[in-house]
Image (tube, rainbow, N blue to C red):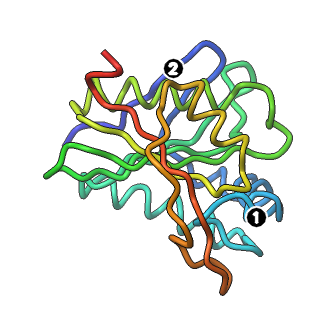
Amino acid sequence: MISFPKLESKRLFLDKLKLEDAPLIAKYAGDKKISEFTLNIPFPYKEKDAVWWIQNSFKTFKENTQYTFGIYLKETQEFIGGIGLILDHKNKKASLGYWVAVPFWNKGFMTEAVNTIIDFGFKNLHLNKIFAQHLVENEASGRVMQKAGMLLEGTLAEHHLKNEKYRTVNQYRVLRSEFM
């Protein structure tokens, strides 16, 4: 089995999640703003949810179905968010998902992390397509995707059901040919 990759950018490193980060993950993901702007993070978010997420990241890596990275500041080694690729091997594509803790919003960290994982997806995983969705209300996430060179594919009306409400998303993509 291959070992989990550690990716680096100018200010960040993306690495395997650690169980000792569960309390901080719960604190950051437990902020209601995180749940409001993501599809998969519930509110309330407890430490047991963080432990499940970490353990699931180990399982899906072993199954070769997903890479889930913690986002850490190089300077302090502090956990600040998560990013991952859900793999579709048959079609050589992956769905990209991410979140960053509220104190680290609007500092360019997520764009840096997204650029790093896109590079990894094409160069190391040999993907043909990486796509991502964001809730239409989360315009900042759309700007991250645009800054990372992703192109808007379309708006998917009432595409996801979250908290008993249908949510509309914008879907962005980048193809290998566009990346290279």
- Mark with earlier residue (2, 1): 2
Residue type beneath disc 2: Glu
In the picture, the disc for residue 8 is: 2
Name the residue located 33 percent from the left edge and 46 percent from the top edge: 94
Q: Nearer the viewer, mark 2 or mark 1?
A: 1
Q: Residues within 10 Å of mark 2 (few under 14, many from 20)?
A: some
Name the residue located 62 percent from the left edge and 64 percent from the top edge: 50
88, above or below 119, in the image:
below
Residue 27 position, x and y percent, is 80, 58
Dots 2, 1 in contact, CB < 8 A: no
Which image quadrant: the C terminus?
top left
Label 1 SS: helix
Residue 155 position, x and y percent, is 52, 55
**Which quarter of the figure has residue 42?**
bottom right
Task: Please give left or right for residue 98 compared with residue 92 in the image.
Answer: right
Could you give the CA–CA distance between mark 2 and mark 1, rounded to whole angstroms?
29 Å
Task: Please give left or right for residue 179 compared with residue 163 in the image.
Answer: left
Name the residue located 53 percent from the left edge and 32 percent from the top edge: 114
Residue 21 position, x and y percent, is 66, 50
Seen as rendered, the residue at the extreme left is 90
Residue type beneath disc 1: Glu
Seen as rendered, the residue at the extreme bottom is 164
In the picture, the disc for residue 36 is: 1
